[in-house]
């Protein structure tokens, strides 16, 4: 069991709040005018998905599935997306990372980037299918592909920003 | 202190295993997706609450970031300024000539209107709001403004900026509202292609330019033609600039929006009520006006000389006038709120609506 055998105290003050709050902040940042437009497409990395990836990768014990569901639902409400789309994407990322994290951790730093690319493509495909289902017709996958590329490019920087938060939450499992 | 894993803690607290919690979460997410399909309005209340809660945060944080972004953008554009200045000087000289011509034409039109005894055009009041954020994800094109129900904004109202149509209000919270942009996949706007007045439905495409559908087979559309709102359906006032035809490829007619959505800072929410929607409809039998059935034979063109005095005429359905200085409603001319079915009518003007000129069903109880 991935989560078994830990010897940390999960009730340490605020430990549970750190992942939840940091993903919440990442969600709240997304609607801010931080993106730049290129040829009709917005260029912005998916901060919330990157945050879910990083926390599931290093501290899954602090991020229960129901929290992931809640955060996804909140994001759908905030960005006016069809309900359930972000929640499904987050849960997909969560499940993939949980099943592969121990293997990815054995790889050099670049290996995690490949893992992140796989997660982003899978979540993008899930979002695309779910949105198409909700709208009743296939939407263009181009925004999702662009978001994946931008997120992978920005991943090292975002990871660097998250490191202090993860230290705050405690040692990795 | 007891040292336990989160999985075990969660298991003990909820009585469910970690795997079961994950499966339940997936089922709930899928349930939301299936339940929400075609029932988007169900979550309107929750979205309104989220808007109201986060409006303060975005009003506070959004503008400095937008200004910073604009400054960065301007820094990159500084080398274009001189060339842009020359171009604007030339354009200004040309516009001065157009202005004189427009003033002459305006006087001519006023004279003709007076000769024809045309009814006065209804004024449109508006409220100016600031764009606080751009909440749209990869598949959604929306904006949020700092005006809500408390400021008199309601769902369905049209939103414009200085250059043209932006979209319409799809959700109004207490102090914040969401605008569905005309580029969004779910946006439908009845439009007219000038100068021939060819009518169609502008459909957002998310990526790239929106397209016009439901054009007549005989329609000959040229690149560069101006596109304005037709006013059909009563949601959008007629003759608001929408954009220009950017390309025509067979049946696909693309429109380049007049508005630059990535540079929007302030918008105007129009308090427009279609004059035709003031006519009450009965749920059965012929439409009634002031309690009396309308004689279909009486609805016919009347020569100008035989028209009734202006004060006894039905409300005008001409080109509405957007009054520039008014920000709030006049006390003596209360704006009529759009009917409850109006937003729904705009929504339904999509794939299932084959007639772009179809009027919304204002029948009381029709939406029940």
Image: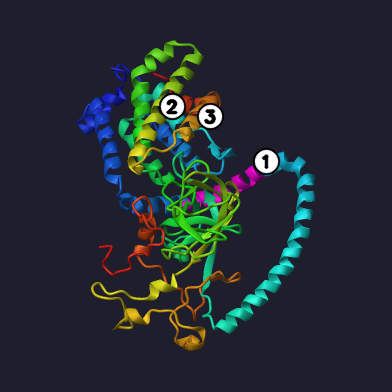
Distance from Cα at disc 3 to Cα at disc 1: 20 Å
Mark 2, secondary structure of its residue: helix
Q: In this picture, is B348 found above or below B307?
A: above
Question: From the viewer's perspective, is A29 left or right of B348?
Answer: right
The residue at which mark 3 appears reads as A150
Instruction: Look at mark 2 in the image and give the residue it sits on.
Output: A120
**Are the numbered discs 3 and 1 placed on the same chain, yes or no?**
no
Seen in the picture, residue A57 relative to B111 is either above or below; the reply is above
> From the image, which quarter does the N terminus of chain B lie in?
top left
Q: Horizontal and vertical percent for residue B87? A: 76, 50
**Pointer 1 indicates a residue of which chain?**
B
- C-alpha gap between disc 3 and disc 2: 11 Å
Are the residues at dot 1 and dot 2 in contact (C-beta closer than 8 Å)? no
Residue assigned mark 1: B72
The span from disc 1 to disc 2 (Cα, nearest Å) is: 29 Å
Which segment did they paint magenta?
A: B55-70
Percent position of residue B303, x then y: 48, 83
Direction from residue B61 to residue B341 in the image, left or right: left
Residue at 28%, 33% in the rendered image: B26
Magenta part, dominant SS: helix
Taking the image as shown, residue B78 lies to the left or right of residue A15, namely right
- Quick one: B9 or B147, which is closer to the camera? B147
From the top left corner, tell me how far across and down residue A148 is, in percent: 48, 28
Q: Earlier in the sequence, mark 3 or mark 2?
A: 2
A167 in magenta:
no
């Amino acid at each position: 069991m991935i989560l078994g055998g830990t010897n940390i105290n999960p009730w340490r003050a605020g430990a549970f709040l750190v992942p939840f709050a940091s993903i919440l902040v990442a969600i709240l940042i997304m609607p801010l005018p931080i993106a730049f437009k290129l040829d009709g497409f917005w260029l912005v990395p998916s901060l919330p998905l990157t945050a879910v990836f990083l926390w599931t990768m290093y501290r899954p014990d602090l991020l229960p599935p129901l929290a992931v569901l809640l955060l996804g639902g909140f994001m759908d409400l905030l960005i006016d997306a069809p309900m359930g789309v972000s929640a499904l994407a987050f849960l997909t990322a969560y499940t993939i990372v949980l099943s592969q994290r121990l293997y990815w951790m054995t790889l050099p730093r670049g290996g995690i980037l490949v893992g992140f690319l796989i997660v982003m493509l899978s979540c993008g495909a899930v979002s695309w299918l779910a949105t198409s289902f909700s709208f009743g017709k296939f939407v263009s996958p181009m925004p999702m592909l662009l978001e994946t590329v931008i997120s992978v490019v920005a991943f090292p920087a975002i990871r660097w920003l998250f490191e202090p938060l993860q230290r705050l939450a405690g040692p990795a499992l | 202190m007891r040292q336990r894993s989160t999985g075990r803690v969660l298991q003990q607290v909820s009585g469910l295993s970690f795997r079961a919690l994950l499966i339940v979460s997936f089922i709930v997410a899928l349930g939301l997706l299936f339940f929400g399909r075609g029932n988007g309005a169900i979550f309107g209340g929750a979205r309104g609450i989220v808007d109201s809660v986060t409006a303060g945060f975005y009003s506070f944080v959004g503008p400095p970031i937008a200004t910073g972004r604009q400054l960065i953008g301007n820094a990159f554009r500084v080398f274009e300024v001189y060339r842009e200045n020359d171009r604007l000087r030339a354009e200004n000289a040309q516009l001065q000539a157009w202005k004189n011509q427009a003033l002459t034409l305006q006087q001519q039109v006023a004279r003709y209107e007076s000769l024809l005894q045309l009814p006065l055009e209804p004024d449109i009041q508006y409220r100016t709001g600031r764009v606080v954020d751009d909440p749209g994800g990869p598949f959604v094109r929306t904006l949020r403004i700092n005006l809500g129900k408390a400021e008199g904004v309601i769902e369905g109202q049209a939103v414009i900026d200085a250059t043209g149509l932006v979209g319409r209000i799809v959700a109004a919270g207490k102090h914040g509202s969401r605008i569905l942009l005309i580029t969004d996949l779910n946006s439908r706007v009845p439009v007219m292609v000038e100068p021939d007045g060819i009518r169609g439905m502008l459909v957002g495409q998310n990526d790239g330019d929106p397209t016009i559908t439901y054009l007549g087979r005989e329609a000959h559309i040229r690149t560069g033609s101006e596109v304005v709102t037709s006013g059909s359906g009563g949601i959008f006032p007629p003759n608001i600039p929408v954009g220009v035809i950017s390309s025509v490829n067979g049946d696909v007619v693309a429109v380049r929006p007049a508005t630059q959505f990535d540079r929007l800072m302030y918008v105007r929410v129009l308090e427009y009520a279609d004059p035709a929607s003031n006519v009450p409809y009965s749920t059965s039998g012929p439409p009634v006006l002031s309690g009396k059935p309308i004689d279909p034979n009486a609805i016919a063109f009347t020569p100008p000389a035989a028209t009734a005095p202006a004060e006894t005429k039905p409300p005008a359905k001409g080109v509405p006038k957007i009054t520039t200085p008014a920000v709030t409603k006049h006390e003596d001319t209360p704006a009529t709120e759009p009917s409850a079915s109006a937003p729904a009518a705009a929504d339904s003007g999509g794939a299932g609506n084959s007639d772009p000129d179809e009027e919304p069903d204002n029948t009381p109880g029709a939406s029940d």
